[in-house]
Amino acid sequence: MPLALLLLPGCLTQSLSPAWLVDRTRLLAVRAEPTEPRPGDLVTFTSLAVDPAQDLLIVWTGCVLEASSSFGCDTTDPEAISLLGVEPLLPPSLQVPADLLDDLPEEDREEGKNYFLTLSALPGDTDLSAIDQLDQDDLLELGIKRLPVSESPTPNHNPDISQLLIDGVIDVMPGGVLTVQRGQTYSIDPILSDGAIEEYEYLNSDGVTEPRVEEPYFTFYATDGSYEVDYSLYPEGAVDWTAPVDPLADTLTIWAVVRDRRGGMGWFTLTVEVQG
């Protein structure tokens, strides 16, 4: 059937879930530490991969720019792809070769090269001994992250959400639990840690380096309830979330994710208990 026909009013028999609703496998964010490594650095990776119904395995693979395209690693050349780890069994990491940028002119090393990282979400009971036999039907979700390696004088760092401010008065720290009433609306305001917003040097299209300041933004997710708007821009980070009247469970989860627009990410996981 032509795609255009599928887009006509009345042709969709099932409405899509809103972007904020975590009702299936979701890769909400990925994080590298350091965010913008130098040659010789050891980089570790974590993902915010969630599924309300099952445990997950996240298989990390990667390749350098020469062995990749804008669509990720070149799967026709298996030797160009490296297995970086499997969360949570084998924490993924990458040892950047010390000579990775040696073939670049000195003036290009501040921009450097990129790795492309592929994340494949699999059911938690997947037999990894047969991983070479898996196909696309076995994947629950797929994600790609670009990792820059450079000698920039202002390398990027991950921002962090240190706490959530609820209704302007309740501070929720990591590991905290928020108790809410059914059907009530709450303001959720993510608070960034000190130094989260960075100044950096940017090479524009004219080849001129100019100073810039990060402009982070937030996205919000939940397993239940509803958002009036599920994103915000710093410094006005607060959004309104309404607790469910008939919750699917007495305990649910909310996530706030911050992105600095340069590849840096951080997140806050909030456990919510519904009463009333």
Image (spheres, grey):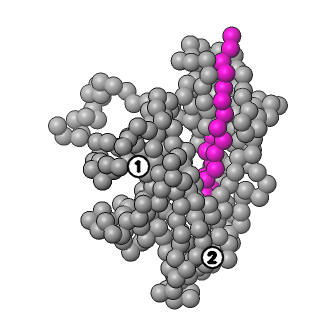
Relative side of 72 to 259, left or right:
left
Amino acid tagged 2: Ser
**SS under mark 2:** loop
State the residue at coordinates (30%, 62%).
75
| Residue range of the region highlighted in magenta in the rendering | 256-276
On-image quarter of the N terminus: top left
Residue 37 x, y percent position in the rendering: 60, 70
| Farthest residue, direction right | 169
User: Which of pointers 2 and 1 lies earlier in the amino acid sequence?
Assistant: 1
**Residue designated by label 2:** 152
**Residue 180 appears in the rendering:** yes
**Residue designated by label 1:** 120
| Farthest residue, direction front | 129
Q: Is residue 233 above or below residue 249?
A: below
Residue 271 in magenta stretch: yes
Circles 2 and 1 in contact, beta carbons < 8 Å: no
**SS under mark 1:** strand
Q: Which mark is residue 84?
A: none
